[in-house]
Amino acid sequence: MRASKPMERHHKGDGLKKWSRLQARMTLSYIGVSIVTALLLELLLSMNDQPGEQVGLNLLLEWTVASMPGNEQQAMERVAEVVLPLHLPDDRLANLKMAVAEAVMNAIEHGNDYQPDKKVSIQVLASQTSIVVRIRDQGEGHPIPETIATPDLDAKLAGLQTPYGWGLFLIKNLVDELHVTNDEHSHMLELIMRRE
């Protein structure tokens, strides 16, 4: 029986990235830089293609859920199931599960406006030292703030602050690192939990 080759994931902009890299290689080759050196430079530059990129990350699972209430629970349980063999301490696993549920709910509600045809994509990755969960919506609305302020309950009750912001604050305090990425077609939260 032959082992199947993993499917490659293609994302918008990949073709342009590949063309830019080919142009860079050709330019470097033209000015006398060896192909080996050009490939090494490309590898070093590509290490920062993703927010919070860490060396040695392996993709454990990638899937999408429809933007419907209740799917955050499914996502939370599926992440827990995938990382269970990594022996994350119980309290840290509980924190990761809660952070994933909140992040997926934010993507469903604020990013995709509960539109079931819009998907929330979830990636679970792991290295020797960390577990990384990336949650991306298809929202084109307001970007997720990159700086997450501490909510002020009195100001919120007085109407001086929006009622929103609790979810991001909670996520930030449940995981070791939170990275936010916004572009014109989506928003992504990257949750990083160290494997202590």
Image (cartoon, rainbow, N blue to C red):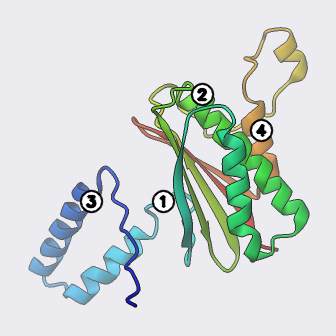
Q: Identify the residue at the far front of this view.
A: 1
Between discs 1 and 2, the one toward the N terminus:
1
Which is more N-terminal, label 4 or label 2? 2
Looking at marks 3 and 4 on the same chain, the residue that comes earlier in the sequence is marked by: 3
Q: Quadrant of the C terminus?
A: bottom right
Q: CA distance from mark 3 to mark 4?
A: 34 Å
Please give the residue where the numbered disc 3 appears in the rendered image. 17
User: Percent position (x, y) of residue 146?
Assistant: 61, 40
In space, the residues marked 2 and 3 are separated at their CA atoms by 29 Å
Q: For the point 78% across and 31% down, which residue is it?
A: 166
| Inter-mark Cα distance, 1 to 2 | 23 Å
Residue 176 in percent (x, y) is at 76, 59
Q: CA distance from mark 3 to mark 1?
A: 13 Å
Q: Nearer the viewer, residue 41 or 112?
A: 112
Among the two numbered marks 2 and 3 on one chain, the one whose residue lies closer to the N terminus = 3
Q: CA distance from mark 2 to mark 4?
A: 15 Å
Label 1 sits on residue: 50
Classed neighbour count for the residue bearing mark 1: other residues with Cα under 10 Å, few (<14), some (14–19), many (≥20): few
Residue to which mark 4 is pinned = 169
Q: Which quarter of the rendering shows the N terminus?
A: bottom left
On the picture, is 191 further left or further right than 95?
left
**Which numbered disc, 1 or 4, marks the residue that appears first in the sequence?**
1
Sequence-first tag of 3 and 1: 3
**Residue type at the position of mark 4:** Phe
Q: Is residue 143 left or right of residue 14?
A: right
Vertical placement of residue 48 versus 186, above or below = below
The reply to whether callout 1 and callout 2 are in contact (CB within 8 Å) is: no
- Residue named by callout 2: 110
Question: What secondary structure is marked by label 3?
Answer: helix
Q: Residue furthest top?
A: 158
Q: Is residue 184 left or right of residue 123?
A: left
